[in-house]
Image (cartoon, rainbow, N blue to C red):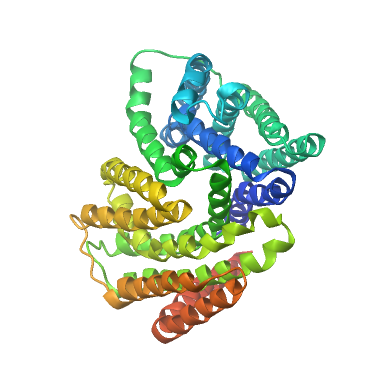
Amino acid sequence: MISKNLIKSSLIYTIIGALPLISSFFLLLFYTNYLTIAQYGALVIYISFTGFMQILTNLGFDTYIGVSYFDGKHDKAVLRAKIGSITGYMLLWGAFIAAIFSILGENIFTLIFQGKDIFFYPFGLMSVITAFFNSYFKTYTNLLINQEKPTRFAIVNMANFIMTLAFSLTGLFMFPYTLIGPMWGRLLSGVGIFIIAFFSLSKEWKIRIVLGEELKQTLRFTMPLLIFFLLSWSISNIYPFIMKNIMTLQDVAIFGLVIQFTLLVEFALNGMGSSIWPKVYGLIKDKQLTGSTPELNKYFSGFNAFSLLLIPASTFFIPLILPFLISKDYQASFIFLSVLNIGFASRGLYNYFLTPIYLFKKTNVLPKIYLATAAIQIAISIILIKHFGIWGAVAANLFTKVIQNFFLYLAARKFFTFKFNNLKFIWLPLFVTIVIICSEYFVTTHNLLLVRLLQMVFSYLLVYIFYRNEVLALFKDLLGKFISNRKREETHS
C-alpha cells in the first residue's frame, strides 16, 4: 500500500525540486532587461564556471552521503561517525580547492580567456566560493531526502529560493547594467544556505576528519563519480567557453539564453521519465528480462510520442509569449530554439539504453562513454563554431546527442538484447527531426510563428497516426495506477 505520507513526500520533492528552474527563469526576465547582451554573456560563463566548481568541490559526496546513510542507518553510532566524517572531508576539500584557485585562478582564466572580458577577480573567485556553499547545501539536502524529512527539505529549499531572488533582484535594481547584483546575489544566498547546512549538520552529526583507511574508502567511491560528473558537465556546458574564444560575449549570451529555454523541455521529459521508470524497473526485475518485450517497448514508445508532442509545443509557445517579457535585444535566440529542442526527440532511446546499464549495475562503462562523447563533442564544437558560429554550436549539440546514444547502445547490448519497432523508435523521430531542421531554412523574423505552428501540426499528425495507441495506453496505465493507489488509501483509512 502506498501511504498518504509517501504521496505527500513525492509531491514535495517534485515541486521543491523545480524551484531552481523557476528561480532561473524568473531572474532571466530581469537579467534580459537590466543587463546588456555582453554582460549577460559574461554571466552565462560565470554561472557555468560555478557549476563546474560545484562538481569539483563536491567530489561526489552528495551521492556518497546517501549510500552511507543506508549502510549505517541501523547503527546510530556508526552512522553518526560516518556522516560526521563526510561533512568534515567536504569542509577540508572545499577549503583546499578554494585556496588553490585563489592562487592559480587568475592564471587559469588568463590562459582560457586570453585576458579579455572575463577575469578571475572578483567574479571568478566569487563563483568558486558560491560553488562550495551550494555543494555543501546540496549534500545536506540529499541527506534530508534519504532521511525522509520532506518538510525540512521544503523549508530549507524555500529559504534558498527566497534568498536567491531577494539578494539578486535587490543588487540588480541597485546596480543595473553591472554583474554586481547577480553575482553578489548568488554569493549571499550561498552564504545563507551554507550557514543553514553547517549548523544543521553540526547539531545532528559530529563533524570530524578521519585519515587512513576511512578516507581511502571514501575516495575509492567518490573519485570515479567526480570524473563521471565532470564529463557530464563538459557535454552540457562546455559551449560558452569554446564560443568565448572564437566569437563574442553577445553570441555567448544568445546561445546561453536559448539553452535556458530548452531546460523546460528537459525538465518535463525528466518528469515523464521518473513516472515510467518504476514500472520499467519493476517489469525487468519481476520478469528477469534480459531483452526487450512488447510490454517494455510500450513505455519507451509512449515516451517518444510524448517528446514529439512536447517539443514542437515548447518551440511554438516560447517565442509567442516571451517577447512580452524580455528585451528585444535577446529575441534573436528564438531562431535557434527549434533545432536545439528537436535534439530531445532521441531522449526515449537514451533512456531505453541507459535503463539496463543502471539496473544491471554496469555503471563502470559510463565514464568511458562520457569521455569518448566529450572528446568528440569538444573537437566538433571547435570546428563547427569556428566556421558556422552559433549554428555550429547548435549542430554540435545535436550531433553529440546522437553519438552519446550510439555509445550507450554499444555498451548496453552486451548484456541486454534490444528488439523494437525501428519505425517508431528511430525512423519517425529522425524523419520529424529532418523535416523540422529543413523547415528552419525558411524561417524569418516575420514568419517564425507560422513555421513553428506548421511544425507542431505536422508532428502532432504523425503522433496521432503512428503513436496514438501507445499514448493512450501509457496515460491510461499511469492514471489507473494513481486511481488504484487512491482507492487503496481510502479503503485503509
Which residue is depicted at the point 53% across and 16% down?
Answer: 102
The picture places residue 36, in percent across and down from the top left corner, at 68, 43
Q: Quadrant of the C terminus?
A: bottom right
**Is 168 in front, or is 492?**
168
Q: Residue furthest right?
A: 174
**Is 74 in front, or is 294?**
294
Which residue is depicted at the point 46% across and 37% down?
Answer: 245
The picture places residue 475, in percent across and down from the top left corner, at 50, 75
Q: Quadrant of residue 294?
A: bottom left
Side of 434 where 122 appears, left or right = right
Q: Residue furthest bottom?
A: 465
**Is 357 in front, or is 118?**
118
Q: Is residue 425 above or below residue 240?
A: below
Side of 40 where 454 appears, left or right = left
The picture places residue 178, in percent across and down from the top left corner, at 71, 35
- Residue 451 visible in the picture: yes
